[in-house]
Image: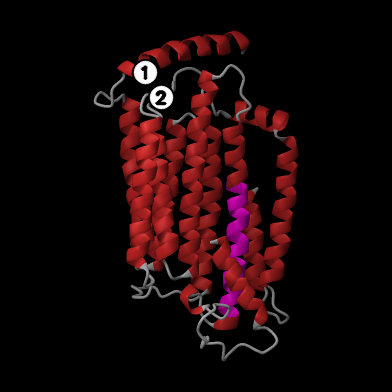
Amino acid sequence: MTPAATLGGLAAGTVNLAAESRGFLSPTGVEIAFLLVGLVTFGAAVITVTTRQLVHAALWLVVALGGLAVEYLLLTAEFIAWVQVLVYVGSVVVLLLFGLMLTRAPIGRSPDADSGNRRVALAVAVAAAAALVWVVVDAFRTTWIDLDGAPAGSTEVTGASLFQHWVLPFEALSVLLLAALVGAIVLSRKAKADAASGATDARRDTEGAR
Amino acid sequence: MHLAYPAVLSALLFCTGLYGVLARRNAILVLMSVELMLNAVNLNLVAFDVWLSRTAEETLHSGQALTLFTIAIAAAEIGIGLAIVLAVYRNRGTSDIDKLRDTAEGHEPDGPDSDATGRETPVPRTAGEKAEATA
């Protein structure tokens, strides 16, 4: 590991020096794939926040989150990608669909999905996007990620770092999940008998989170 | 790969989620937008972690560990948030954030709390505010 790391460091140093010569006009294959998947992800996210059909919004959210999982794979973070698929696509979206059904969301187009301050929200979002993109592009225009070599986020690497350096937060997180489980059950249970739906939701949530 | 690609995509996704949080009226749609914002942060963390794990000699892989923590916390948050939304819906008959204005200052509320019992009304009010705060 150590000679490989030093070799990687040397290679990264040379690559960083050479990154000035890498232009945005001659993208690599990984960059083209990242760009295409990113366009799909961004489009699905925009449809998620603008569509008037509530169930369609949840289903487009699946596309956006799955696209992000593909982006993680392209960034060689395999473990995060599969956790993303398991937790987000498998559990969170199902939970959101359950919530939509339990609050009796209309199936067709609902005219009042957007509130009255839509134009203000659009202005704020566009201003924030312009500022963020400008700053980020200006800061990281010449920074180059070297994706060759061993993957930076394989299960072995992630597990080793998680259980060597991050054990205490990991255990604290399990306590947090337990607290969330108890809290969801307490919040969604009523004094009468119709507590079953909320309790199953909470149980499904923690199953997905593990 | 240029670091600018994932950074720009993450900024755009974050602003999409920001628009959704500000513009949506249904509480569950607001929660979906929050998920988008959290995912934008996750993409940033993973991209910078991959970049740093190549350039630095010694790395803790803190970006990926924090991404895992964010995913777990987001799952817990969505569970609690949906439980709050369901409690509000059960007591008030709506999951519409604009109608949960009982604690707003300025004008008298005329919310649809006809079906709520007198004992339970303070609880969903604070819960509704908490849903907004979490969102």
Is residue A196 or residue A56 the one in the foreground?
A56
B114 w.r.t. B124: above or below: below
The disc at residue A94 is none
Residue B134, by quadrant, is bottom right
Q: Are marks 2 and 1 in contact (CB under 8 Å)?
A: yes
Quarter holding residue A155: top right
Across and down, in percent, residue A89 comes to 49, 51
Q: Which mark is residue A19?
A: 1
Q: Earlier in the sequence, mark 2 or mark 1?
A: 1
Q: Position of residue B96 (x, y in %)?
A: 48, 75
Give the answer, above or below, for where A153 lies relative to A68: above
Instruction: Give the prevailing secondary structure in the magenta stretch.
Output: helix
Disc 2 secondary structure class = loop
Q: Hey, which quadrant is residue A188 in on the image?
A: bottom right
Residue A84 is situated, as x and y percent measured from the top left of the image, at 52, 44
Q: Which residue matches tag 2?
A: A143
Describe the element under mark 1 as helix, strand or loop.
Answer: helix
Question: Which residue shows up at 47% across the image and 33% down it?
Answer: B47
Write the start and end of the magenta stretch as one range.
Answer: B71-90
Question: Above or below — where is A102 with respect to A161?
Answer: below
Label 2 resides on the chain identified as: A
Residue B13 visible = yes
Q: Amino acid at mark 1?
A: Ala
